[in-house]
Image (cartoon, helix red, strand yellow):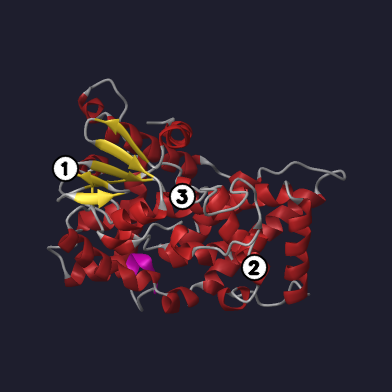
């Protein structure tokens, strides 16, 4: 399972776009099959998604399989991810970025002409600070404190969730270390402090969770608040920081493209005092091309998205019976040389004009998944990128 990102491409290369990897488990490449799995037929998530829940009776947006329950849950939470709502959060995001810049400047000024900076770690701190400032009432202050304890809690939770999802029996072995309760203590403390506050309500994601609980106490319980906060803390920070790190790595390995991007940015924002907003960065064609190409070449999700068939379905000209696990390999689709000339290469220009006579096929680019299960935080992530 952990090596699937390396094994699957070799299987597709050897056997084609449809590969049976288990008695009732098939992985798929190809635009038509992947679109049908996750968009057109919107197939259900697999039963093992329930194994990643801390409480089997409390589903998050990630682990909820029931279509009706998922739609209700998404409807409750979607106001916190709308473009208009996110626009109001931009000043908080800019404050975190300003602090990030100040810490970088200090690290560089303290050096004797050269210094080494863990940009991946600092970006991870930054995205966590932005997430907490915009969602839970205040920044964690990780950029300034350089304290990795909280990030270690996130990593521990991700690792244990992955392990228990594949080997659930380990949770019941007395000597096997379980989830660190410190993260749950932190989440419950944040909730308690917010409820104890007087005065006007803060306009953030936590308040949306609390309001949803007040209006729908049976369908969105206290346990749901904790589950969604925990999910957003973990998934909302590290995925974004890693994708940003990948983009920087690709640019550093392609000096000419880095130069073009820097020129565009300096032209658009000649002074450090110029206001940078999500709206005006949308006008920067090369920046947009760089971000899209980085998500295509070095994606965060490198494994297939598993779904299960409820009825017989035809995929890649094969009739697939009910009850079959079908994996939609988006990362493989994004590097399919039949769709992307020089698929392994970082070429932002392909997003600006036809590259080698081939225009970008937008239906073959789905970095945030698709259909009803597309990432609810897509716009939030893009705001962080820009």
Tell me the CA gap for discs 2 and 3. 20 Å
Q: Earlier in the sequence, mark 2 or mark 3?
A: 3
**In this figure, which residue is indicated by the disc labeled 2?**
353
Residue at 40%, 46% (x, y): give it.
Answer: 29
**Which residue reaches farthest left?**
218
Image quadrant occupied by the N terminus: top left
Question: 90 or 95: nearer the eye?
Answer: 90
Q: Position of residue 296 (x, y in %)?
A: 54, 53
Q: Which quarter of the figure has residue 68?
A: bottom left
**Which residue reaches farthest front?**
317
Residue 197 shows in the view:
no
**In this figure, which residue is indicated by the disc labeled 1?**
323
**Which residue reaches farthest top?**
175
Q: Residues within 10 Å of mark 1 (few under 14, many from 20)?
A: some
Vertical placement of 25 versus 59: above or below?
A: above
Tell me the CA gap for discs 3 and 1. 24 Å
Q: Secondary structure at mark 2?
A: loop
**In this figure, which residue is indicated by the disc labeled 3?**
333
317 drawn magenta: no
Chief secondary structure of the magenta portion = helix
Residue bounds of the magenta highlight: 203-207
Vertical placement of 274 versus 196: above or below?
A: below
């Amino acid at each position: 399972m952990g090596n699937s990102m390396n094994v699957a491409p070799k299987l597709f290369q050897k056997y084609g776009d449809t590969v049976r990897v288990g008695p009732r488990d098939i992985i798929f490449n190809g635009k038509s099959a992947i679109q049908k799995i996750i968009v057109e037929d919107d197939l259900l998530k697999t039963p093992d998604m329930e194994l990643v829940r801390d409480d089997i009776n409390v589903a998050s947006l990630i682990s909820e399989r029931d279509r009706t329950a998922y739609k209700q849950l998404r409807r409750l939470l979607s106001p916190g991810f709308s473009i208009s709502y996110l626009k109001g959060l931009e000043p908080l995001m800019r404050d975190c970025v300003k602090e990030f810049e100040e810490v970088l400047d200090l690290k560089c000024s303290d050096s004797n002409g050269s210094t080494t900076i863990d940009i991946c770690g600092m970006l991870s701190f930054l995205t966590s600070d932005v997430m907490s400032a915009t969602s839970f009432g205040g920044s964690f202050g990780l950029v300034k404190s350089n304290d990795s304890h909280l990030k270690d809690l996130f990593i521990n939770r991700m690792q244990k969730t992955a392990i228990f999802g594949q080997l659930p029996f380990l949770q019941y072995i007395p000597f096997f270390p379980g989830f660190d309760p410190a993260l749950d203590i932190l989440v419950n403390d944040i909730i308690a402090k917010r409820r104890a506050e007087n005065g006007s309500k803060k306009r953030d994601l936590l308040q949306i969770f609390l309001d949803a609980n007040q209006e729908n106490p049976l369908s969105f319980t206290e346990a749901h608040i904790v589950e969604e906060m925990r999910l957003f803390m973990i998934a909302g920070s590290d995925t974004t920081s890693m994708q940003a790190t990948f983009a920087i790595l690709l640019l550093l390995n392609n000096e000419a493209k880095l130069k073009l991007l820097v020129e565009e940015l300096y032209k658009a924002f000649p002074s450090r005092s110029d206001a940078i907003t999500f709206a005006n960065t949308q006008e920067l064609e090369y920046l947009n091309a760089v971000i899209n190409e980085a998500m295509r070449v070095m994606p965060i999700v490198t494994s297939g998205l598993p779904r299960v068939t409820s009825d017989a379905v035809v995929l890649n000209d094969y009739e697939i019976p009910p009850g079959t696990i079908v994996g939609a390999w988006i990362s493989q689709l994004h590097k399919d040389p039949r769709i992307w000339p020089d698929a392994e290469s970082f070429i932002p220009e392909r997003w600006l004009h036809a590259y080698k006579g081939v225009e970008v096929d937008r239906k073959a680019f789905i970095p945030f998944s698709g259909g009803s299960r597309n990432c609810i935080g897509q716009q939030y992530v893009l705001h962080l990128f820009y």
